[in-house]
Image (tube, coloured by chain):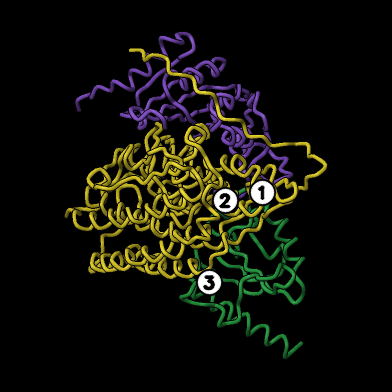
Chain colours: A green, B purple, C yellow
Amino acid sequence: MMGPRLDPERFGLQAVAGGLRQCDLIIVEGTVTKKMAKRLKIVYEQMAKPRYVIAMGDCACSGGLFHDSYSIVNDVHKIFPVDVYVPGCPPRPEALLSAIVKLREKIRREEVFA
Amino acid sequence: MTQVALPREEGIINQLKDQFPEAIKETKVDRARRVTITFDKDHLQEIATFMRDQAGFDHVKGIAGIDYPTHKKIEVLYFTGSFSKPEIQDLVVILKTELPRDNPSIASVVSVWQSAHFHERETFEMFGVKFEGHPDLRKLLTLDNWDGPPPMLKDIKFPEMGQR
Amino acid sequence: MTTPPAERKPPAPPITITKTAEPSTLDVSVGPQHPGSGHLRMLIRVDGDYIVSVDTDIGYVHRGCEKIAEYRNYVSNIPHLERPCIIDAIHLNWGYVLPVEELQGVEVPPRGQYISTIAAEMNRIMNHLYWVAINAGVFSGHTTIFMWAFGDRDLFIELAEMLTGARLTYSFLPPGGPRRDLPAGFGEKLTKLLDYFEKRLVEYDRIFFSNPLVVARAKGIGVLKRQEAIELGVVGPVLRGSGVKYDVRKVEPYGAYADLDFEIPTYEEGDSYARFMVRFEEMKQSIKILRQALEKIPKGPIARKAPLVAPEGEATGRVESSRGEYTVMVMGDNSDKPYRVKIMNGSFRNLIALPYLIRNVHVADMPIIYGSLDYWPVEADR
């Protein structure tokens, strides 16, 4: 999705440029293992508020194909609150782009009703 | 179906049988290019050194453990191959040995085949097999503070597995 | 029949993982979050600008594939065993299905073999394009090749979608042969794309592979000599970049490779630039293979029906995936679920080269060496 075909920069999305503390969005793509979950929480807490989360892929949403494995975390929302879920295995890049557009609407609503 | 003669495969079996008559328990040519040799675990270092220097099998593709809880044994398989000798490059020789299930331990082949380094670590973690002489035997893949049993053993049934 | 004793070559120096640190060194953790390739942590010990040693800490994406494989039946195992390396899914699928077919005694008809070969070589090109974009491009700071390679890769993905119905995770080869035949118009579209892509490869050469910046950064860095490569047991482009001509497609031909004419690019220098060039040349060879396969493909059925159970026994099969020799052992026990599936893939076997090569190098050389090895953490962890 970051490639030239879909170009998310026109929707206001840019890959991490300066460092973790300037990021607003973390996209959790793929399976979250128990070993990685600890580090994921540390990364999330390093981001400055307001911060948003997109859970991409069936594995991040609810475990997916590997739901019965001994080493993965099935529900990412136990680690931190998730704003947008993108199902699919793997999701099409257009689906991820539409998730970013949905997130922008959600952010705009928060600013109105905050 | 006519039986095709397989001279290279038979040749390796005969070489090993001549050199280690008491250590080789069972040999089998599964098909062309696949030979399985079951040996006694105490002779691992000598057989490995012979395979590397005389027969030319210079690397290990992988080390697999297979758990048989009913027979109370764990089998360890070494998949060996050759890069340097073109005439045997297409053979895969599987060296198989049995270990008792309650305290499985075997000598490490890292001093003979350095390619076995990470494979032995993984088999130690997944099956609980101790490789004596390995320079750095510690966990590789599971959680840092995993205090559970070796995951790949058959009687370890994680409750979620197989549920729909 | 005894062969004379071969000369005993001294073994390569062992990997040293230094436990005690010198006072002048600093331990830095690189990772585990790696958006490009996958999660792995390298604990590097630096002394000024030099990396003294590296301890690789893997397992951040370990999903327990081998254990899960014992709880799924043979066909259900396919989507789940092709996901370790999602960009190279056909090879992982094929490597698993070859021993299953051997156990069950099923032979794939010739047209099915050709279709599998076409899908596999397209997958190899897609994989190498991803590699050149991320591992060679982004990790060395070269963003133009990232944009170009991803743009071209999308064209191949569209064709793969036309053939299999999915962009990345095809599940295309159940035991017995491919799921679908070549759709109408596929041959012409693929030929047009190959003509376009061949011209693009010339431009890739000019902008990246002959770029003085890239050459200066990669030549002479991370040298793996021939004997060391053999001792460490590395595979794939890493092995061929060190002068060993070993490719499963020639050593133990499967699919349609026995009837097709292609070469195995090998370079003697063993440095990172040699490994880059091996993959570049492999893309050219894949174009050649695809053109021949489209011409020579025979008519006939594409698949045979395979039973749902496999008899008792063990079978080992291997294919040449984009990262190297991919070996799978499947053990059946007269039921519809395997008793044991053991996967030996290229990334895990190449892992040993990471602490071996990243020693006494500048910190800036580390991404180049890591990128040239094309280590895919998800595949190595399974």
Q: Quadrant of the C terminus of chain B?
A: bottom right
Residue A99 figure quarter: bottom right
Rate crowding at label 2 as few (under 14), some (14 to 19) or many (20 or more) other CA atoms within 10 Å: some
Residue position for label 2: C370
Residue position for label 3: A2
Which residue is more in the foreground, C346 or C179? C346
Q: Position of residue C190 (x, y in %)?
A: 28, 65
Q: Are marks 1 and 2 on the same chain?
A: yes
Q: Position of residue B9 (x, y in %)?
A: 33, 22
In the picture, measured across the screen, residue C177 lies left or right of residue C92, that is: left
Tell me whether the residue at label 1 lies in contact with that at label 2, contact meaning CB atoms closer than 8 angstroms.
yes
Instruction: Give the residue type that dot 3 points to.
Output: Met
Instruction: Give the residue type that dot 2 points to.
Output: Tyr
Q: Residue at x 35, y 36 (%)?
A: C103
Q: Secondary structure at mark 3?
A: loop
Pick out the residue farthest to the bottom: A112
As measured in the structure, the alpha-carbon distance from the residue carrying label 1 to the one carrying label 2 is 11 Å
Q: Position of residue B70 (x, y in %)?
A: 55, 27
Residue C337 visible to an observer of this rendering: no
Q: Which mark is residue C42?
A: 1
Q: Secondary structure at mark 1?
A: strand
Q: Are marks 3 and 1 on the same chain?
A: no
Rate crowding at label 1 as few (under 14), some (14 to 19) or many (20 or more) other CA atoms within 10 Å: some
Residue C202 figure quarter: bottom left
Q: Quadrant of the N terminus of chain B?
A: top left
